């Protein structure tokens, strides 16, 4: 089959003929229709993911049709449409897996990072981590939900009952989750890089009541800040924007170093939490 292969960090993707994968006992063999491009793919390219395995076929927002199933697969059938996300496998035995926090597994595998992903004609994926795809979504609509939608929704859930939410960095996760938060009746404020008018317009198009630069004060203090941009300097800025007891939620898979900041920002303002996918 044909696949786009990244032989090492910093290299260009190469179109190569590679062996078609074979479904193991728990796997689905999927003919790929669509695979989204995620910011994490750039972290892979930039050597910012220490566990990455090379050469690798990237891509972890995969939608396709099942063409074969392993002998132990019961929950999917050939011909079904399935989605494959970032979390590709967990050990099922470590303390996190046993506690139902498999996203924190000590021995997890990640699609398109430690196991081959969806920049290919076919992918084999553990069925226990695949999603059935409802017919209401097209392939193109469904693919971004498998990472951007997933981490966005997880971050929004960590914001619990927050009514006034700041969203930082208007990539795919922010675009999806802003629309959902607005639909839920929350008030959303959009923060972008200074001067990024296009991103601020996009934020307005998604439903925010105010859009501005991350170094600007929002018109009112926030109950929660969701950080999707991989920029550590946003953490102290967001802490300044939330009121006492507010939450700053770091949702990215990678972030540059967080600069030192005065403890008063934590004491007088919010706490912060990380939202592992
Ligand atoms: Zn992703
Ligand atoms: Zn585990």
Image (tube, grey):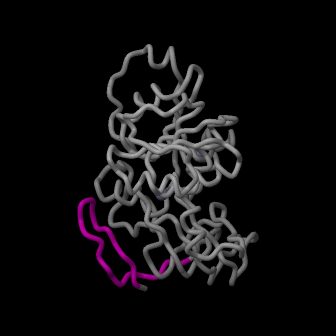
Locate the N terminus and report the quarter of the image it occupies.
bottom left
Viewer-side residue, 160 vs 219:
219
Residue 28 picture location, percent across and down: 62, 74
- Residue at the extreme right: 74
Which residue does the image show at 59% across and 70% down from the upper left?
A: 141
Which residue reaches farthest left?
11
Would you say 29 lies left or right of 263 here? Answer: right
Q: Which of the 4 image quadrants contains residue 132?
A: bottom right
Is 19 colored magenta in this rendering? yes
Q: Which residues are magenta?
A: 2-22
Where, by quadrant of the figure, is residue 83 drawn? bottom right
Residue 173 vertical placement versus 100 (above, below): below
**Residue 90 in view here:** no
**Whether residue 98 is visible:** yes
Looking at the rendering, which quadrant does residue 263 occupy? top left
Position of 148 relative to 94 (above/below): below
Residue name at image x 31 percent, y 59 percent: 45
Magenta span: predominant SS is loop
Provide residue 183's location: percent of width, then percent of height: 69, 52
- Picture layout, residue 112 above or below residue 3: above
Give the number of callouts. 0
Q: Residue at x 55, y 82 (%)?
A: 31
- Residue 125 lies left or right of residue 214; in this view the side is right
Q: Nearer the viewer, residue 155 or 94?
A: 155
Where is residue 126 shown, x and y percent of the image? 60, 65
Q: Is residue 233 magenta?
A: no
Q: Residue at x 39, y 45 (%)?
A: 230
**Image position, residue 149 (x, y; %):** 58, 57
Residue 194 or residue 75, whichever sits in front: 194
Q: Which residue is more in the foreground, 52 or 251? A: 251
């Amino acid at each position: 089959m044909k696949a786009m292969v990244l032989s090492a960090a910093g290299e260009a993707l190469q179109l190569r003929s590679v062996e078609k994968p074979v479904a193991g006992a728990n796997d689905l063999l999927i003919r790929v229709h669509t695979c989204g491009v995620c910011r994490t793919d750039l972290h892979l390219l930039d050597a910012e993911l220490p566990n990455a395995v090379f050469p690798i076929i990237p891509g972890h927002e995969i939608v396709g049709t099942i063409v074969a199933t392993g002998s132990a697969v019961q929950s999917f059938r050939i011909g079904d449409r399935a989605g494959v996300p970032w979390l590709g496998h967990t050990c099922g035995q470590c303390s996190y897996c046993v506690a139902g926090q498999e996203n924190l597994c000590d021995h997890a595998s990640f699609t398109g990072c430690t196991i081959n992903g969806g920049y290919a004609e076919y992918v084999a994926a553990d069925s226990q981590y695949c999603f059935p795809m409802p017919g209401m979504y097209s392939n193109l609509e469904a693919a971004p939900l498998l990472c951007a939608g997933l981490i966005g929704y997880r971050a929004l859930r960590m914001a619990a009952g927050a009514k006034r939410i700041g969203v930082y960095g208007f990539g795919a996760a922010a675009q999806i989750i802003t629309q959902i938060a607005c639909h839920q009746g929350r008030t959303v404020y959009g923060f972008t890089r200074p001067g990024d008018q296009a991103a601020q317009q996009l934020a307005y198009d998604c439903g925010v009541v105010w859009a501005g630069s991350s170094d600007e004060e929002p018109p009112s203090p926030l109950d929660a800040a969701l950080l999707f941009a991989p920029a550590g300097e946003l953490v102290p800025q967001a802490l300044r924007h939330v009121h006492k007891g507010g939450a700053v939620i770091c949702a990215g898979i990678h972030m540059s170093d967080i600069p030192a900041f005065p403890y008063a920002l934590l004491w007088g303002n919010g706490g912060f939490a990380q939202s592992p996918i």
